[in-house]
Amino acid sequence: MANRPSASYQPSTWTCDFVESFKIGQTEIYKERQRKLEEEVRKMVDDEDVEVEPTALLELVDIIQRLGLGYIFDRDIKRALHRIISVQAKSNDRKQKSLHATALSFRLLRQHGYQVSQDIFKHFMDDNGKFKACHCNDGKGMLSLHEASYLGFEGENILDDAKSFIGIHLRHHLGKINIIDPSLAEQVNHALELPLHRRMLRLEAREYIEAYARRLDANHVLLELAVLDFNMVQSTHLSELQDMSRWWRYMGLANKLSFIRDRIVENFFCSVGMVFEPQFSNFRKGMTKLIALIVIIDDVYDMYGSLKELEQFTEAIERWSMDAIENLSDCLKLCFQALYSTVNEMAYDNFKEQGVNTISQLKKAWADLCKAFLVEAKWYHTKATPKFKDYMDNA
C-alpha cells in the first residue's frame, strides 16, 4: 500500500445541513415596490439638467454603481454618459473642471469602454510634469484621482505618477480630512486599503450601502432600492448555493476522499465574484462545479498520487474513456468518474440550450490542465530539496 501524505486540511465550517437550513425569503411581494423605485431612479438618471451640472450626474452614476444597482440601469447610464460627453465637448474650452470632476469623469468613462486620454490631467500639473502641491488640500479631488489612477494602461506615465503622488499625500493629510469631513476620511481609508477597481462588486455594494446610509445627503429612494435589490439578489444566490450544496453532497467526494478540500461554499463565492447578476444563475452553478473539480484534481496531484499513478491518471484524462481507469486506485477512479460525468453533463446541457457541441474543447482543456499539474508534480518529486518537501508537506 502506498504511503500517502496527510493534507491536514481544516474541515469546512459550512456543512451541507447548515447551508440547507437557511430560510429563503419571499421576494415576489417586493417586485412591485422595486419597479416603482426603479422608475424614480431612472427619471433621475434621465434628467436633462446634465447640461447645467454634469458633475452631479456623474456622482449619481457613481453612487448607483457602488450601491450595486449598475446592472439594472446599464442602458440608462450609457445614455447619460453619452450626454455628458456631448456637454463636455461643447464646454471644455470655456470652463475648466475641478480635479474631482475630471478624475470621476475619466474613471466612469473608461469603465464603460470610452476612449479617454490621460492628457486631461495635464492641467493639474506644473511645468516639471508633476502634480501641483496645491491639490493636496483637495481631499475629494485626491480621492477621485486615486481611484482613476488604477484604470491606467501600461505606459501611461501620468497615471503612474498620480498613483505615487496620491498614495503619499492622502495618507499624510488623512488627519486633516477627518477633521473637515469624517465621511470623506472614511472613504479615503477604504480606498487606501484597496482601490475600487480591485474590489469584488457584491462585497463593495454591501459595504457601500452601510456607508451611504450614514451620509446626511443620502438619497432615500436610492438607498431603499439598494437594500431591497441586495436582499433579493442575495436570496437568489442563497438558493443557488443550496443547489450546489446538494450537488456536492450527492457527489460524495468529501466523505470518501480524505485528502481533498471541502470548500463548496468558497467555490460558489468565487463564481459570485465573477458574475453576481441574478440572470446568470446557470453560469454561477457551472463555474462552481468547475472550480470544485479543479480543486479536487489539484489535490490529487499535490497530495495523493505517486508519479506512476499521476501519469496513468493524466493518460486517462487525455483518452477521456472509462476503460482507461482500470489500473487506478479506487480514489482516483472516483475522481475521474466525478470529472467525467460532470463535464459530459455540462457539455450536454450546452448542446441542448445552444446547439453547440463543446465536449472536444472541454476534454482538451482538462487534459492540458492535468498535464501542467503533472509537470509540476514531476518537478516536486525529482528536483525539490528535502527541506522544501518537508516545508510543503507540513504547510
Image: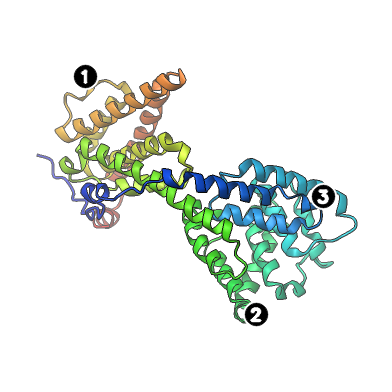
Way the structure is coloured: rainbow
Give the residue displayed 55% in from the left and 71% down from the top: 186
Q: Is residue 174 visible?
A: yes
- Dot 3: what SS? helix
In the rendered image, the vertical position of residue 276 relative to residue 192, given as above or below: above
Task: Find out whether the residues at labels 1 and 3 contact each other: C-beta distance under 8 Å.
Answer: no
Q: Amino acid at mark 1?
A: Asp
Residue at (43, 24) in percent of width and height: 361
Classify mark 2: residues with Cα within 10 Å, few (<14), some (14-19) or many (20+).
few
Percent across and percent down for residue 231 are 43, 52
- Disc 1 element: helix
Mark 1 or 2 closer to N-term? 2
Q: Is residue 330 left or right of residue 148?
A: left
Q: Position of residue 129 (x, y in %)?
A: 79, 64
Q: Quadrant of the C terminus?
A: bottom left
Is residue 99 toward the left or the right of residue 294 in the image? right
Q: Which residue is mark 3?
A: 87
In this picture, residue 135 sits left or right of residue 277: right
Q: Which mark is residue 180?
A: 2
Residue at 25% from the left image edge and 46% from the top image edge? 20
Amino acid beneath label 3: Val
Q: Residues within 10 Å of mark 3 (few under 14, many from 20)?
A: some
Q: Nearer the viewer, mark 1 or mark 2?
A: 2
Q: Eyeballing the image, is 370 above or below 96?
A: above
Q: State the residue in front, 47 or 103.
A: 47
Q: CA distance from mark 1 to mark 2?
A: 72 Å
Three-letter residue code for mark 2: Ile
